[in-house]
């Protein structure tokens, strides 16, 4: 199918300007999406535009990723109830450095036929004086026009109102579109559905300034089937930076997708073709317990973000972790899974020589209230160390029994876990 039809099938066309379907089928369209540098890493909420740009590049349309070094110091009011804190120039630059590497995993900047570009709008916005801005940009927008935009209208009706700083964001984004049109013949801007007002303002601006036709396409804002915000967990945002969200926890996020969501996510976030996705959806309907679609989703997205090695590690960890023995796993992977459970630390000397009894460790960690309770639990088969059932109440643990010599995972019953970390010698 043609690109626009595929985007529709994947559920990625929330709205588009008239004529785009025919134009994108017959011409190469240089396309841009903006990325907000409010943190040193993007999160899974940014994946949809990243994959969208990659999808266009694979179809022969040169993509531009605009990192908002200039607009990021102001803040987009779209979808925001209150004005966020302004970022310092130094912080924005630091954030851009982190984001650049993440974008490079999706976009091919070395492709000579359809090159991807990464630009920072601070390059032109920071050189724009207030007088130039009002003369060359502001005069083309009426206040009534700006107030009619949903992002501005919604905020202006609240008690907090909207500051002049954020009110000006629409003009700055329109100016971005004009600069990219002039420099790179960019004629298409994409974004989330909350960006429709900003994008169409840029389309109008290019028409007025250059008598040229530009286009916009917006994608739906993603929510779960339960109506909650996509990408949020009890632990917070799911980041693309492995130091903020481990690859194993990232993999688990996708593996835990609900059956009602997984089909949409496969369409949105992967390059699997229609036949494969529909087969996976069919498998979910017929045998949801197999979670075949979730495994495919987790595998594909983790591979794009973190690479094949981390996919293999995550799959192995998932298989072993929820099996019988986790003693061969990497300690960091185990810690990432159990980072929300209680933990305690013991000195390495406790494990020297004959080591420490499991009974003592259970009681000292607080997982049991006493050695007597620990003994009774072991006799009843309710104690596990590193997912191995302990059946001998006299069992002892030594340093060599610990995962990578760093920790034990104690479990009482089916769900009560406790991590015992071993202090460095």
Image (spheres, helix red, strand yellow):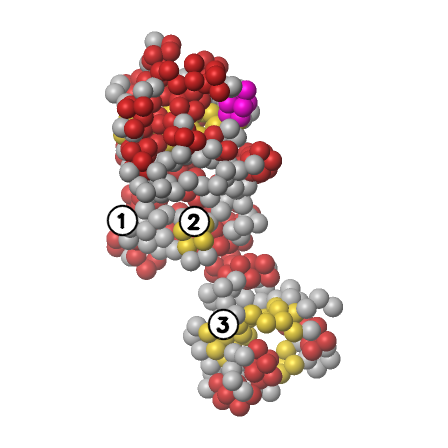
The answer to whether residue 18 is visible is yes
Which residue sits at x=52%, y=70%? 342
Q: Quadrant of residue 32?
A: top left
Report x, y in % for residue 395: 60, 83
Viewer-proximal residue among 397 and 77: 77
Q: Which quadrant is the C terminus positioned in?
A: bottom right
Q: CA distance from mark 3 to mark 2?
A: 25 Å
In this picture, which residue range is highlighted in magenta?
121-127
Report x, y in % for residue 272: 38, 39
Residue 122 on the magenta span? yes
Q: CA distance from mark 3 to mark 1?
A: 36 Å
Residue 335 on the magenta span? no
In the rendering, which numbered label is found on residue 298? 2
Which residue sits at x=35%, y=27%? 198
Q: Residues within 10 Å of mark 3 (few under 14, many from 20)?
A: some
* For the residues bearing labels 3 and 1, Cβ distance under 8 angstroms: no
The first of marks 3 and 2 along the sequence is 2
Label 2 SS: helix
Residue that numbered label 1 is attached to: 282
Residue that numbered label 3 is attached to: 417
On screen, 32 above or below 132? below
Of the residues tagged 2 and 1, which is closer to the observer?
A: 2
């Amino acid at each position: 199918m043609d690109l626009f039809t595929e985007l529709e099938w994947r559920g990625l066309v929330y709205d588009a300007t008239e004529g785009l379907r025919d134009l994108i089928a017959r011409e190469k369209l240089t396309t841009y999406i903006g990325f907000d540098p409010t943190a040193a890493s993007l999160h899974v909420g940014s994946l949809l535009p990243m994959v969208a740009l990659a999808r266009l590049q694979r179809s022969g349309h040169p993509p531009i990723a605009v990192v908002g070094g200039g607009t990021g110091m102001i803040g987009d009011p779209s979808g925001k109830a209150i004005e966020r804190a302004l970022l310092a120039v130094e912080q924005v630059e630091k954030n851009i450095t982190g984001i650049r590497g993440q974008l490079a995993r999706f976009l091919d900047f070395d492709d000579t036929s359809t090159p991807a570009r990464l630009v920072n709008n601070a390059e032109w916005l920071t050189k724009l004086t207030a007088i130039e801005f009002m003369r060359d940009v502001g005069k083309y927008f009426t206040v009534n026009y700006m107030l009619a935009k949903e992002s501005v209208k919604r905020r202006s009706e609240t008690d907090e109102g909207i500051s002049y700083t954020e009110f000006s964001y629409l003009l700055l984004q329109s100016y971005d579109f004009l600069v990219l049109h002039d420099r790179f013949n960019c004629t298409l801007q994409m974004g989330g559905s909350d960006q429709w007002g900003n994008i169409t303002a840029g389309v109008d601006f290019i028409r007025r300034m250059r008598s040229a036709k530009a286009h916009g396409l917006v994608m739906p804002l993603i929510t779960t089937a339960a109506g909650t915000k996509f990408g949020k967990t009890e632990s917070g945002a799911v980041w693309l930076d492995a130091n903020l969200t481990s690859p194993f926890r990232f993999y688990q996020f996708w593996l835990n997708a609900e059956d009602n969501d997984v089909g949409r996510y496969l369409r949105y976030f992967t390059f699997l073709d229609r036949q494969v996705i529909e087969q996976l959806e069919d498998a979910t309907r017929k045998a949801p317990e197999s979670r075949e679609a979730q495994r495919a989703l987790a595998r594909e997205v983790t591979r794009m973000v973190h690479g094949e090695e981390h996919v293999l590690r995550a799959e192995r960890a998932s298989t072993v972790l929820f099996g019988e023995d986790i003693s061969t796993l990497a300690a960091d992977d185990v810690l990432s899974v159990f980072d929300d459970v209680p933990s305690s630390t013991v000195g390495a000397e406790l494990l020297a020589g004959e080591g420490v009894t499991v009974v003592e460790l259970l009681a000292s960690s607080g997982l049991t209230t006493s050695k007597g309770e620990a003994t009774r639990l072991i006799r009843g088969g309710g104690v596990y160390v590193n997912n191995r059932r302990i059946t001998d109440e006299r069992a002892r643990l030594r340093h060599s029994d610990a995962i990578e010599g760093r920790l034990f995972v104690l479990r009482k019953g089916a769900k009560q876990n406790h991590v015992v970390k071993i202090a460095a010698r």
